[in-house]
Amino acid sequence: PFSTRNEKDYFNLLGVYLDATFFPLMRYESFRQDGHRFEFATPDDPTTELKLQGVVYNEMKGAMATPGSVLRTGEPAVVSEYHRLEEVRPRVRRIFEEHGLKTVLLVQVGGPQDALGVLTLWFPRAMETNDPIVDVAKTIAAHAAVAVSRANALEDRRASEERLQLVSDNVSDVAYSIAVRSDGSFVTEWVNNAFHEMTGWDTHEGATVEHW
C-alpha cells in the first residue's frame, strides 16, 4: 500500500513492507493494542459498560466513516474519538479539543438513487450506531431531503415558466393556457402579447374567463 516515482524510495519502502510481512516482530503488547478488544468505558471501573477498542479497529472506523463511504452504503457512520485519527486535519483536531467534542455522526440525506449529500453532526460524547440520537439524525436528514427536493422542484418550475414565457412572447400567433378546475370550471392562466394585438384586450382582460 505505497507508491512513489523515486526508484530508491520504492525499494526502501518495499524492503520495510516485506520485512514486516515475512519477519514480523509480534509481541503480546501488539495484540493488546491492535486488532480489536473489549475494555470498560472507564478502564478502572468494572461497573461501566464494555466498549470495542483497538488501533486497527479505530482506524477502520475512521476509513468507513467518510461521506463517500456513507453515500456508497447508505448506512449511518459513527466515529468516537474522531480527533485522534491520524487523517484528521490539525484545524479540525483543534476545534474538537477546544469544544470538548468526541464523536462524528454521518447520515445520508436522500435515498439510495437520489442521494443529495451527507449530514454531519459533532457531539461531545461517545456513542454507537444504535444510539437513539442516530434515529433523530435520520429524521432530520429525511426532512432535509424533502425540503431540498421541493426547492429543486420549485426552481425547475420557475425555469420552465421562464422558458415558456420567452416562447410565448416571441410567437406571432395567439398563445394562451387554460386550466380546468376540479369543479369542471375553466380558468385562463395566461395569454401572450399577440392576443392584445389581435383583440384589443390587454393581457389582464384576456386572462379573465368572462371575456371568452
Image (cartoon, grey):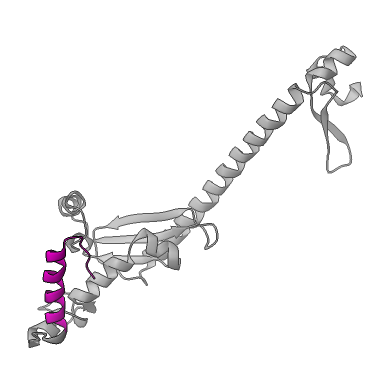
Q: Is residue 146 above or below residue 22?
A: above
Please tell me whether residue 142 belongs to the stretch shown in magenta. no
Query: Residue at (75%, 22%) from the top-left corner?
Result: 170
Outermost residue, front direction?
7
In screen coordinates, is 108 left or right of 11? right
Q: Is residue 147 above or below residue 188?
A: below
Viewer-closest of 26 and 193: 26
Viewer-closest of 208 and 168: 168
In screen coordinates, is 134 left or right of 172? left
Viewer-closest of 147 and 25: 25
Please tell me whether residue 2 belongs to the stretch shown in magenta. yes
Asked which quadrant contains residue 38, the reply is bottom left
Q: Is residue 35 visible?
A: yes
In screen coordinates, is 80 left or right of 121? left
Q: Is residue 19 above or below residue 59?
A: below
Q: Is residue 201 visible?
A: no
- Number of numbered discs visible in the structure rendering: 0
Residue 97 pos. (x, y %): 15, 54
Q: Which residues are magenta?
A: 1-21
Q: Is residue 146 above or below residue 78?
A: above
Asked which quadrant contains residue 188, the reply is top right
In screen coordinates, is 50 left or right of 27? right
Query: Residue at (76%, 26%) from the top-left corner?
Result: 168
Residue 118 pos. (x, y %): 41, 56
Viewer-closest of 172 and 101: 172
Q: Main secondary structure of the magenta part?
A: helix
Quarter of the image with the N terminus in it: bottom left
Query: Residue at (84%, 19%) from the top-left corner?
Result: 195
Quarter of the image with the C terminus in it: top right
Residue 83 pos. (x, y %): 19, 59
